[in-house]
Image: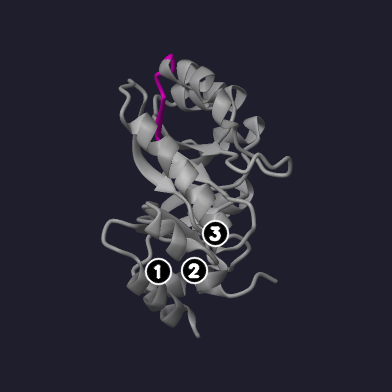
Amino acid sequence: MNIKENIDYILEQLPKGVTLVAVSKTKPIELMEEAYKCGIKDFAENKVQELLEKHENFHSDVKWHFIGHLQTNKVKYLVGKVHLIHSLDSVKLLNQIEKSFGKANEVANVLIQINIGREATKSGMLVEDLSEFISALESCEFVKARGLMVIIPKGNEQSNRYYFQKTKKIYEDLKNTSYKNFCMEILSMGMTNDFKIAVEEGSNMVRVGEGIFGKRI
């Protein structure tokens, strides 16, 4: 299938209110252009340098999502260029985002990345560290958390559902609390191989790369 057919297929599976983010990392502008012509306006990158280059050379109405592990020394480059940072995973990174975006008097919209499978190889904070993190977040002026993001462990449908349900419960519990600097609007979970299950379990934002653009080289 080509990019248009891939996107049409995915959009048919998504209920109203679910945002499709095209993960364009390593993909050239020409392929992104095909997706853009299909109405895709949300694109995600996992390297700051690649996001900056594409931001400079692609359509101005695109919303850029940063989904990779974000180093503190790279935060300043995203100011004014990123719609949503999906990978806020530590107080140290929070403080740097607050500092860098504060200098420009701009608010950073972020998702809190949770390491739901407690995997040593994955970024994200552990659930038990959430309350301490939220306390730090509440003292910020320039960071607003809009929800949660997870990358679940590889597994079968049963284990996928388990981790998605676990994340949705955390999301709902947080939704029922009242905070100044965060609200649960976005639940970013589900990728190429599991987005349908993720949506069934409550995701309202899916990140699809290979399912749109084909295998990465």
Question: Residue at position x 55%, y 66% from top?
Answer: 193
Instruction: Tell whether label 1 touches label 2 (CB within 8 Å).
Output: yes
Tell me the quadrant of the picture where the C terminus can be found. Answer: bottom right
Q: Which residue is mark 1?
A: 36
Farthest residue toward the right?
Answer: 120
Disc ID at residue 168? none
Question: Residue at position x 37%, y 60% from top?
Answer: 41
Disc ID at residue 158? 3
In space, the residues marked 3 and 1 are separated at their CA atoms by 34 Å
In space, the residues marked 3 and 2 are separated at their CA atoms by 33 Å
Residue 198 image position (x, y, % from top left): 45, 57
Q: What range of the chain is rendered magenta?
A: 139-147
Q: Secondary structure at mark 1?
A: helix
Residue 78 appears left or right of 61: right
Count the numbered circles shown. 3
Q: Secondary structure at mark 2?
A: helix
Q: Measured along the vertical axis of the image, is residue 33 above or below residue 204?
A: below
Residue 140 painted magenta: yes
In space, the residues marked 2 and 1 are separated at their CA atoms by 6 Å
Q: Which residue is mark 2?
A: 32
- The residue carrying pointer 1 sits among few (fewer than 14), some (14 to 19) or many (20 or more) residues within 10 Å by Cα, namely some
Q: Is residue 145 visible?
A: yes
Residue 161 image position (x, y, % from top left): 50, 55
Amino acid of disc 1: Tyr
Task: Tell me which numbered mark, 3 or 1, is placed earlier along the sequence.
Answer: 1
